[in-house]
Amino acid sequence: MNYNETLRLYKRYVDVIAMMKKDGQLQPMYMIWEHHGVRTPYKIDKIYRIRKAASEVGGCGILYEIKIDGRDRKLFYERDRWFLESYRP
């Protein structure tokens, strides 16, 4: 595997547990990661910023810049589903 292949991003659709706040804001609380049939919930520790944006992997929607399990991630709400920019397909 060469250097460029290790940096390739993918669009990884995920399940999200979210709260609809009384002001109408959608707030993700947990992201569910599935790997080999095992579903693991991860608490979203912090939301840094929410804005409309396009993804580097295609698609656009509402970008949630978040911290999960000590790592900064980009979580997108695209129409009616969620995805992460991930280095694993």
Image (cartoon, rainbow, N blue to C red):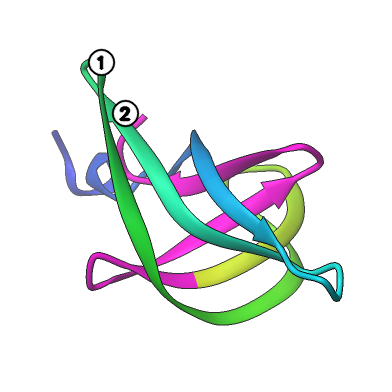
Residue, disc 1? 37
Q: Is residue 81 magenta?
A: yes
- Amino acid type, label 1: Gly
Q: Are marks 1 and 2 in contact (CB under 8 Å)?
A: yes
Mark pair 1, 2: CA separation: 6 Å
The vertical placement of 4 against 15, above or below, is: below
**Residue 35: % across, % down:** 24, 26
Please tell me which residue lies in front, 31 or 73: 31
Instruction: Identify the image quadrant of residue 22.
Output: bottom right
Q: Main secondary structure of the magenta part?
A: strand
Secondary element at image label 2 = strand
Q: Nearer the viewer, residue 67 or 87?
A: 67
Q: Is residue 16 left or right of residue 60?
A: left
Camera-side residue of 29 and 51:
29
Q: Amino acid at mark 2?
A: Glu
* Residue 12 seen from this side: no
Residue in the image at 23% along x and 44% along y: 6
Name the image quarter holding the N terminus: top left
Q: Which residue is mark 2?
A: 34
- Residue 19 on image: x %, y %: 64, 59
